[in-house]
Image (spheres, grey):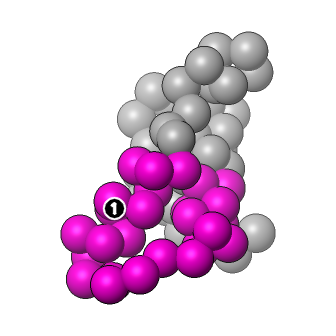
Amino acid sequence: MAQLSKRLIPLAAMEQLIKQAGAERVSDKAKAALKEVSTDAVKFALHAGRKTVKAGDIKLAVKK
């Protein structure tokens, strides 16, 4: 898990992703939620023994 914490994307990057999707403004809670989902998706991929995050990992992370 130590490797995972070094690879986290900053909240500013989360904001840019959401804005690129069409949002005009992004709340701090929305940025944190997207960061949590992306972190969980990476954990699921690593748990499955993969380096690649797949759509299924993201779907599971959203359901969590």
Q: Position of residue 46 (x, y in %)?
A: 61, 31
Above or below: residue 24 compared with residue 10 = below
Q: Nearer the viewer, residue 6 or 25?
A: 25
Q: Position of residue 55 (x, y in %)?
A: 41, 60
Who's the residue at 76% across and 69% down the image? 64
Q: Which residues are magenta?
A: 11-37
Q: Position of residue 25 (x, y in %)?
A: 41, 81
Residue bearing the label numbered 1: 17
Q: Is residue 5 left or right of residue 20?
A: right
Who's the residue at 40% across and 49% down the image? 13
Above or below: residue 4 compared with residue 38 = above
- Observer able to see residue 49: no
Q: Nearer the viewer, residue 3 or 60?
A: 3
Who's the residue at 37% across and 70% down the image? 18
Q: Residue flagged by tag 1: what amino acid is it? A: Leu
Where, quadrant-wise, is the N terminus in this rendering? Answer: top right
